[in-house]
Image (cartoon, rainbow, N blue to C red):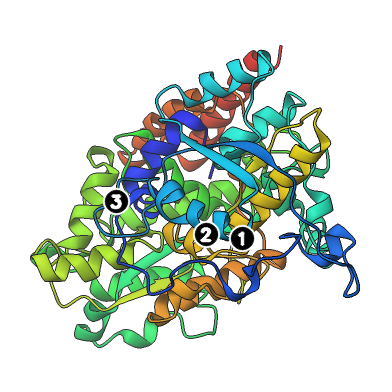
Amino acid sequence: MIRNMKFKSLFVAASVSLLMGSTIGCSTNEGSSASTKPSASVAPAASTGATATTAPQEDPKIELTVWAAPNGTYKPGQKAGDWFKEDLLPEWNKLHPNVKVNIELIPFDGINEKVTTAIASKSAPNVFLDYPGRTLAYGQMGALASLESIIPPTDLAQVKKSADMMKMVSVGGTVVTLPYYSTQLGLILNKSLWKEAGAEKLLPQDEFRTWTPDQFKAALKAVANKDKGVYGLTLFALNEQGDQIYNNIISGYGAKLFNADYTKYTAGDSPETEKALAFFKSLVDEGLVTPHPETLTSTNALDYWKQRKNGMAVASAAHSDIIKNGLKDGSVSGPNEYMYVNFPSTTPGQAALKSEIGFGVVFKNTDAVKEEWAKKFLYWSVKDNVIFQTAMKSFDPLGKAPAWTETDPELQFLAKLSTKTKEWPVIDPGWGIKGYPEMRAAMFPEIQKLFIGMSTPKQTIDTISQKFNATIAKYNK
């Protein structure tokens, strides 16, 4: 799935923002993890050159400026992002009181303009805590420092081995954002509906819950009941947010959305894309999805899911909270036994993963000491601290399941799934695309035409490709 700064918030409304900005339960993990005891260095020994015989040295007396997008909550009642100052910073001060960190929350409205202005005026912060959909652009401007010195060699090798991961965390082959953060999306389904239909066996049975399009369709057919107004899934094409599920399943058919340098939309070159669009059309024609998807939005899909009018929805980890809290306050109809599964794929036993990887950057600085400590602060914050992991509901694609998943087997599954990014294809988020808002706006009318029979799958992808590549050409002149 492809995104840019302005449409992150739209996508979030359908699924992901619940991950970044929703209020989560009070964590039982207070403070830093056990590995963040006070020391002369917070980066791994392998990346700093420290040895067991190196004598600890006093930290330098310096100040760092850290900007952060207002994402996540750590305690009930907090505003999004307040945990940076209220919870994370006090833990840093215990470890490194000499290295003063000043954190400023930057509102989403105008965030990119503020950062680019700061870069131009050479007043950029030392650290910016935000996602690569925005920050990789600063790397293209030459403003970001390499983070490869603070990433252990074994982890760095794993990242560099994955072209899909490198697209999300690097510029020009150099890693500039930490790869220890990921959001993991898939489908969340109400297993209760399949149990009631006596069709639980049709749901994915293997360890990583994969299924083919045919198996997926059979499961939808088992719960679709026109008389009761219940369907296996809700497709939607009234606004551009629909591109998510279409791109995810197109990728599951084996098509690549873009070429390596984002100079061409390549999905139209693959016959698999036409097959994927034909698959979507068949779900509509066979009455397996909510009728008239050309009139529906992502909000409709989520509401139907809450009301047990469809069996599954695109979801992040935060959707588990929607169910738990909704069953208590009545906004979710029960019973609802939730289960996370992958998007269907034509490769048995595998799926194209909707994993968005990377968080945090360090701006280049003429003061080498400040740049070094900026990297240490970033590493400690993202990799070595349960406060960050809990507030951001962050998975570590290179590590073990985070503490905030321990009480929920379904969240443990998502954590395990996030580690498959080292082996399975990862859906291209398109963070290097220019003009993608125009592409998204151009896509959904063509999907509408497909659903109402005004175009064939081949005509649909040909028109989308023509419009997308015209947009790319315009922005690459």
Task: Work out whether residue 93 or residue 442 is closer to the camera in this orientation and state it.
Answer: 93
Above or below, 454 against 361 in this view is: above
Residue ID for mark 1: 95
- In the picture shown, does residue 462 fall above or below 396? above
Image disc number at residue 243 = none
| Crowd tier of the residue under label 1, counting other residues whose Cα lies within 10 Å: few below 14, some 14–19, many 20 or above | some
Which is nearer the eye, 64 or 25? Answer: 64
- Disc 1, SS: helix
Q: Which mark is residue 91?
A: 2
Question: If you read the primary sequence from the N terminus, does the residue marked by circle 3 or circle 1 appear first?
Answer: 3
Q: Which residue is mark 3?
A: 78
Residue 88 visible in rendering: yes
Q: Quadrant for residue 135, please give it.
A: top right
Query: Mark 1 and mark 2 in contact (Cβ < 8 Å)?
Result: yes
Q: CA distance from mark 2 to mark 3?
A: 18 Å
**Which one is in front in this view, the residue at disc 3 or the one at disc 1?**
1
Measure the C-alpha gap from mark 3 to mark 1. 24 Å
The three-letter code of the residue at mark 3 reads: Gln
Q: Along the polypeptide, which appears first: circle 2 or circle 3?
A: 3
Task: Name the amino acid type tagged 1.
Answer: Leu
**At 87% from the left edge and 75% from the top edge, which residue is drawn?**
52
Three-letter code, disc 2: Glu
Q: Position of residue 292 (x, y in %)?
A: 22, 45
**Direction from residue 68 to residue 326 in the image, left or right:** left
- Calculate the distance from the C-alpha at mark 2 to the C-alpha at mark 1: 7 Å
